[in-house]
Amino acid sequence: MSQGSSVAVVGSGLGGLASACVAAARGHRVTVYDKNDWMGGKAAVLHEGGFRFDMGPTILTVPRVLERIFAEAGRSVHDYMDLRRLDPQWRCFFDDGSRIDLIEDVDAMAATMDRFAPGQGIGDGYKRFIAISEHLHGVSERFFFWKAVQDLFDTIDLRANMNPGTLRDVLSLRMHATVASTIRGKVKDARLAQMLDHFVQYVGSSPYGAPAVLCAIAHMQTAEGVWYPMGGTRAVAEGLMRLATELGATLKPADEVLGLDIADGQLRGLRTRDGTSAYDAVISNMDSVRTYRELVGGEVGKAYEKKNFEPACSGVVLYLGLNKRYDHLAHHDFVFSRDPEEEFDFIYRKGEPAPDPTAYLAAPSSTDPSVAPEGGEALYVLVHTPYLRPHHDWSKMFPAYRRTILEKLKRTGGMPDIEERIVVERHLTPQDIHDRYKVLNGAIYGLASHGRMMGAFKPGNRSREVRGLYLAGGAAHPGPGMPMVMMSGWIAADALDQDLRGSREPELRKSA
Ligand SMILES: Cc1cc2nc3c(=O)[nH]c(=O)nc-3n(C[C@H](O)[C@H](O)[C@H](O)COP(=O)(O)OP(=O)(O)OC[C@H]3O[C@@H](n4cnc5c(N)ncnc54)[C@H](O)[C@@H]3O)c2cc1C
């Protein structure tokens, strides 16, 4: 490798930016393309009438991933962003009028749960659930995280690793169980089980379909906290952009990649409206399935057309500038549906918006007063919906669903006068998400994690079909959400770096 190899990154989501930072820190010459005129993908910001809204992600967990990316360049993430730890992590409002705060300390949370639903051993059940979650988190760290994985065979080198310890770990993945059954086996109160179900909403999947290993998310949050970067989660994208440019990367907004230049299974470069540019390697942060279908094309693209990848859920977001804040809200709040089975059945099986949905709220003004004029609130309301189906026309569906959401906030969220407080209003529908971020069927979180055996696996970070192509982002391993997409960016850049330095000869497999 002389003076670093030339590397292009297609897409500047957090996964793409993280991969650009790591590749540049390892000495490669990096160019990042994004079709949008801003960088950061879903971590976008909206300024409107004196209010500032994070448009996409709002809950930041596992800051260790950010620390590792900045450490690649010998920097500290804390010099680039001011991260504040939030506790309570969530405030939860249930349909029966009861409320509980999810707090970080497990023993204190268990005691709170016993007061909330006395005489059922719930606190003890919660501690046992967190112990399972901690174990699954440990197994995930050993087998899934920080390495390029596509399937069980990548995860476990059977000859090298199949010892009693590995066997124990594999069996403990609880492949017979789902997230919902694992939770309900330990926590008998329906409301508290509903609260714990929502960790898996971080990956846009049904707790009734997601494999038990995803219970690990609960321990990631209780152990490592919920964080708010001052200035909003947009500060994460801006910190990564600053690091990438300091390391010499070139950022090219408003420059869509139209195809990849591939000859004999080897990547040669990419095509934009200005023609073809040669690169030694490409990291695609575009949705992985669409990368194969639209950028790679040919036989590989056709094979991906036939694969039945299920998109994760989509969502509707309301950005409400309020002239008066609600003092009963915490920074992060959940206003829960009347019936989780009904809700998840609508979103994930029927493919229609839930009639009585759960609304997630971010009310950041108490942590960061700069989000709103004094005394006001930049209220962010997210409701998960199914991914786009052919008959969904959100230009027609939105007005009625907006009303459903506002009625839910009035009824269950203690905000009867919300409409009188709104002075600024914008929204995002599944169709907007689809068009802005070029995702699969409007999916917010890449591919659904459904299936007890294979639900945790996504297309791998090192392409098996094209030498020199790597994948990063929510639809690639290890999956969606800010920490996971940034880890995915690290993995893609690390795999690329190993291959270009010749420390590993990538093998091309026929399977598509
Ligand atoms: C409303 C909402 C709420 C969320 N809440 C949370 C949360 O609270 N916590 C959390 O951790 N996560 C949350 N997420 C998920 C999180 O935002 C995503 O998992 C993550 O930001 C996605 O990053 P990514 O790297 O996959 O790229 P993306 O953000 O999907 O960006 C991909 C980029 O690639 C560009 N692109 C695509 N194709 C091309 C092409 N051919 N040429 C050039 N550019 C191209 C797109 O324009 C886009 O900018 C939320 C997401 C949304 C939308």
Image (cartoon, rainbow, N blue to C red):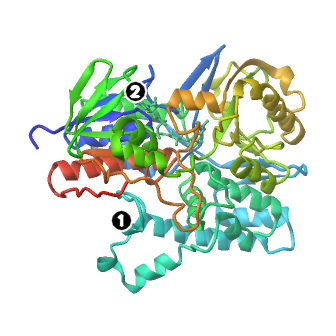
Q: How many numbered callouts?
A: 2
Residue plotted at (83% across, 42% down): 355
Instruction: Kindly identify the amino acid type of the residue bearing the numbered disc 1.
Output: Asp
Residue 487 pos. (x, y %): 41, 50
Is residue 201 shown above or below 255?
below
Q: Nearer the viewer, residue 121 or 481?
A: 481
* Amino acid marked by disc 2: Asp
Whether disc 2's CB lies below 8 Å from ligand 1 is answered yes
- Name the residue carrying label 1: 154
Pinpoint residue 284: horizontal percent, then vertical percent. Answer: 36, 39
Secondary structure of residue under mark 1 = helix
- Quick check: 3 left or right of 270? left
Vertical comparison of 365 with 504: above or below: above
Mark seen at residue 34: 2
Q: Is residue 126 visible?
A: yes
Please name the residue shown 36% across and 49% down the image: 68
Q: Position of residue 400 (x, y in %)?
A: 82, 29
For the residues marked 1 and 2, what is the alpha-carbon distance in whole angstroms?
31 Å
